[in-house]
Image (cartoon, helix red, strand yellow):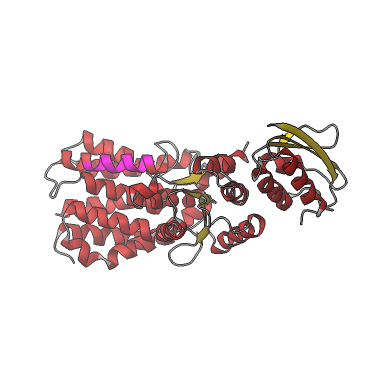
Amino acid sequence: MSSNLNGRLLEATCQTISEHADELTRLDQAIGDGDHGINMKRGFDALAAAAEELQQLDLPSALQKAGMLLVMNVGGASGPLYGSLLMAMGKAAVDTPSCVDDVVSMLRAGVDAVKARGKSDVGAKTMLDVLVPVLEAIEKNPASPCAAARQAADMGLEATRAMQATKGRASFLGERSIGHLDPGARSSALLVHAICNVLEDS
Amino acid sequence: MTDNVSIVIVSHSPKVAEGVADMVRQMVGDEVRIAFCGGNPDGGLGTNVGAIMAAIEEVYTPKGVAILVDLGGAETNSEMAREMLPAEMAANIVICNAPLVEGAIMASTEASCGADLETVRSTAEEFQA
Amino acid sequence: MSETVTGQVVINDPDGLHARPAVKLTKLAKSFCSDIAIKAGDDGEWINAKSLSAVMKLKARHGAILHVRATGEDARGGVDALIDLIKQNMG
């Protein structure tokens, strides 16, 4: 196991994407083009392959480098979306976030970048339906940010089931997209859980 | 060659991208430089920011580059590719909101006659109406 | 000096004025500085021959009479060139 926090976060996020790649693909087959799992795995495999280099970098540089790797390797719309999230977080990050406010401002920059990149917002059955509630939950619960983030991620994810997609491939299905979890929201929730687990252990 | 706006075709499928470029060359001619790319970094269906950047650079001219895309991810990845290029290049790159095949023919026809980038884009998008 | 010249030609291509010849016709029209309009049949509406979108939507069929009208310095050359192109069966 890696000793530093960046390394452990990287390891945990890569592992959860790898373990759930098939599930993400199944979700995407229902309402998208069925490549979310394999695309995300390709992106996070590239991060794992660059682990040694990423661990040497400070947090802002590591996030920006990781974002760039996702952009160049994912091969679907989720590449620029997750890539923009990480690159914007990296630009807004301080070297060693010391309080919840640091995390909130970093995450807010990332979420804003996803909204801009996807020309979307909450309610469109996307990863934003997890990320935005998670951001708000952390902001409102500085005493127990991880527990709040996990719960918000789960509720946000579940809420996508009843939504009709208005963005991406799923939007072609119109009402038929209702009743399925959004694969991007699922991958975001997985990442939130993995990150919270590491942060609570540290 | 006179300096005309260049065209970049971005599809999820390398075969579709190549086929559209072939149609443009046959229907419009070779006064317009055209580059194409398709497929994800593994060669499967998808799009690839690095390949899109390379395609843009292959035919880049300060006169402008008009990109035609097929589905959602192709547009998002093309926007990303444009932003990752130097700002002075990005300013001369547009992504057309038009159907891929029809838009490529319309844009190329307009470009082959020396039109500026904004005219090329609006001609491609005209087909929507 | 600006003049208006008109002409007409029968479309011989069995497929009519389909997409590929529409591109050729539009490109040719754009090479003249005159305003050039075409219409299909006597009752058709004049459309801008330099707009590919309009030319494609014209859907002029085999056997239809294509009218060409140009206004400007090179109007005569424009009308003749377009009629020649149609006569050559769109090449």
Q: Could you tell me how many numbered marks the image carries?
A: 0
Residue plotted at (26% across, 37% down):
A137
> In this rendering, does residue A81 appear at all?
no
Foreground residue among C76 and B41: C76
Does the magenta segment cover residue B31? no
Q: Quadrant of residue C74?
A: top right
Residue lying at the far right of the rendered structure: C63
Foreground residue among A125 and C40: C40
Q: Quadrant of residue C6?
A: top right
Residue plotted at (25% across, 40% down):
A148
Q: Main secondary structure of the magenta part?
A: helix
Residue plotted at (29% across, 40% down):
A134
> Which image quarter holds the N terminus of chain C?
top right
Q: Is residue C24 left or right of residue A186?
A: right
Foreground residue among A52 and B94: B94
Residue B4 percent location from the top left of the image: 52, 51
Q: Which residues are magenta?
A: A106-116
Check the image and report above or below for B116 versus A67. Answer: above
Residue A189 percent location from the top left of the image: 34, 48
> Which image quarter holds the C terminus of chain C?
bottom right
Foreground residue among B129 and A132: B129
Residue A14 percent location from the top left of the image: 30, 61
Residue lying at the far front of the rendered structure: C1
Residue A197 percent location from the top left of the image: 22, 53
> In this rendering, does residue A130 appear at all?
yes
